[in-house]
Image: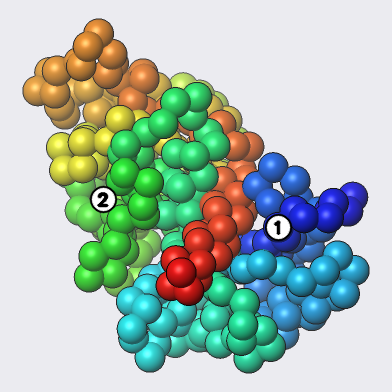
Amino acid sequence: MGVSEGEALYGAIEAGGTKFVCAIGAPDRIVQEHVIPTMQPLETMAEVVRFFQTAQQQHGALAGIGIASFGPLQLQRDSPDWGRLLKTPKPGWNAASLTEPLRAHWPAQPIEIDTDVNAAALAEASLGTPQAMRALVYVTVGTGIGAGAVVNGDPLHGRMHPEMGHIYVRRDSRDGAFEGVCPFHGDCLEGLASGPAIHRRWGSELSKLAIEHEAYPIIGSYLGQLAATIVLTLSPERIVFGGGVMSNGELLPHIRAAMREMLAGYIPPRDGEGAIEDIVVPSQLQGRAGLLGAFLLARRAVARRLTKES
C-alpha cells in the first residue's frame, strides 16, 4: 500500500530486548513493517538504517522518526548522551545510542525518543480509549515490568522517566521463600512478578498454568499493589495492563481484587464512575501500543521542529 500525495510519512521504531519492529506510515495506516532480531547495538542499528533507507527509496522521505525503546534511557535533550541506554540488564547495550546512527544518515529529520511504556501510554491515551484521558498509566508485564504515564497529553518525565517496575511490594505470605530475579534489586516488583520470575518459580509461562494455580493470586497481589500505588500517587483515570504475562486475561481479576483490598475504600468514585473495573483495564491495541506510540512520537518531533521554526 502506498501513501497518497500530501500525506505525511513517519518512521517508527519499537526497540525491544528481543526484536526491533520498524515501520513507516502513520498510526492509522502502516505502509511497511519489518522485524529485526535484537543483536549487538552496531549490528542492530545498521539493519534499522538499512530498512529506512530502502523504505524511503520506495515510498519517499520521512517527515520524522519516533523511537519507543526499552530502557532505562537518557531523555534529557540537552544532554550529550540524549538517546542512549543507561544501565540496562540487556548484555552489550549499556550506553548504546539509538539516535546517533539515525542522525548520522538523516541529520535534518526530527527524531523523538521515549521509553516503550511511555510511548504505549501515549497511544493508549490517544487511540485506545473512546474519550480523552487527562492522566493514564500503561503497565507492561513480560520479560520485565515497566510503566509509563501520560498527563495532560504529555509523557511524564522528571529526573528521568518512570521506573515503576523496580518499586518494592509487600511479600505475599505464600511466596516468602522466593529470592527474586532482578539483577539489581532481587525481590523488587520485577524480580517477583515478571515472566522470568514466574518461570523460575513454577517452571512455566503463566498462561500455561491452570487458572486455579496459586500463581494467579500471588502475581495478582503484587501487580494489584502496583496499581494501588499508582492510583495513590498519580491519580490516573485509567491504568492499562499489557504485555505477554497478561495475554490470557486471567490475571486481571486478581489484580483488581488486590488493588481493591489495598485501597480499602479510600479512593471514592467520581460522578458515579471510577469503579476499579473502569480504572484497571486491558490494552485495546492488540499488542501494538508501543509501535503506534512511536508513530505519535514522530508526529511530536515534527511538531516541535515546526514550533521552533515559527
Quarter of the image holding residue 107? bottom right
Give the residue type that dot 2 points to. Answer: Ala
Q: Can you see residue 275?
A: yes
Q: Say whether disc 1 or disc 2 marks the residue closer to the N-terminus.
A: 1
For the point 43% across and 72% down, which residue is it? Answer: 308
Check disc 2 and report the residue beneath it: 177
- In the image, 242 versus 290, the foreground residue is 290
Give the residue type that dot 1 points to. Answer: Ala
For the point 36% across and 54% down, which residue is it? Answer: 155
The picture places residue 137, in percent across and down from the top left corner, at: 35, 42
Q: Which mark is residue 285?
A: none
Mark 1 vs mark 2, CA separation in Å: 55 Å
For the point 34% across and 49% down, which residue is it? Answer: 149
Q: In the rendered image of this protein, does residue 51 appear above or below residue 130?
A: below
For the point 68% across and 61% down, which residue is it? Answer: 10
The picture places residue 173, in percent across and down from the top left corner, at: 20, 37
Quarter of the image holding residue 220? top left
Looking at the picture, the colour scheme in use is rainbow
Q: In the rendered image of this protein, does residue 73 appear above or below residue 82?
A: above
Q: Which mark is residue 8?
A: 1
From the viewer's perspective, is 76 left or right of 305? left
Quarter of the image holding residue 225? top left
Please state which of the two labelled residues, at mark 1 or mark 2, is closer to the viewer.
1
Task: Determine crowd level at label 2: few under 14, some 14-19, many 20+ residues with C-alpha closer than 10 A.
Answer: few
From the viewer's perspective, is 205 left or right of 5? left
Q: In the rendered image of this protein, does residue 181 appear above or below residue 122?
A: below
